[in-house]
Amino acid sequence: MHSKGVPDSDFQPLLVITTASSKDEAEFLAGQIVQARLAACVNVVPGIESFYWWKGAMQVDREALLLVKTSAAKVDELTSLIREKHSYECPEVVALQPDAIAPHFKAWWKDNLPAESIAT
C-alpha cells in the first residue's frame, strides 16, 4: 500500500473521456475535477470536430476533448460533477479501463488520487 490512498490491489485506474463546447469550458471543468481530487490529471485537447446526432438532426461542432485520469472508485462522483457543471444537456462520459500502464506512471496516478475527494 502506498501512503496516500487505497491499497495497490484495490486501485482500478480509468481514463474518462468527455467533451466541452470550448477550450474555456474544458479548462473550467478540468480545474473543477482536479481541485475536487476526482482525477490525478486532466488533459485538455482543443480544436476537435465532432459529428453526431442530436434531436433527430446531424450536427457538426468544434469542441475540446478532456482526458480524465481517475479510478473506478471515483467515477460516479466524477460523472455527477460533470453533469452538474457542464453546459450540455447530455454530456459525454465514457470510462475506459487501460489494458497496460507503465508501472512508474500507474504509481504516480494512484498516489495523486487520494481516497477522499473534496467537494467543489
Image (cartoon, grey):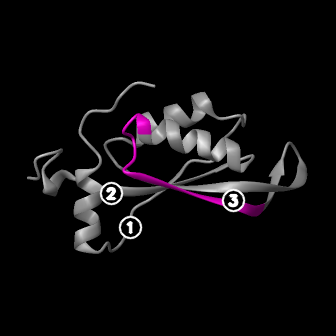
**Kind of residue at disc 3:** Pro
Crowd rating for badge 3 (residues with CA inside 10 Å; few <14, some 14–19, many 20+): some
Q: Position of residue 53 (x, y in %)?
A: 82, 53
The residue at which mark 3 appears reads as 46
- What whole-number distance in Å separates the C-alpha atoms at marks 3 and 1? 23 Å
Q: Which residues are magenta?
A: 35-49
The residue at which mark 2 appears reads as 13
- What whole-number distance in Å separates the C-alpha atoms at marks 3 and 2? 24 Å
Q: Position of residue 5 (x, y in %)?
A: 18, 44
Determine the residue positioned at 50% across, 36% down.
32
Q: Secondary structure at mark 2?
A: strand
Q: Quadrant of residue 119?
A: top left
**Kind of residue at disc 2:** Pro
Discs 1, 2 touching: Cβ within 8 Å: yes
Q: Position of residue 100 (x, y in %)?
A: 33, 74
Any magenta on residue 40?
yes
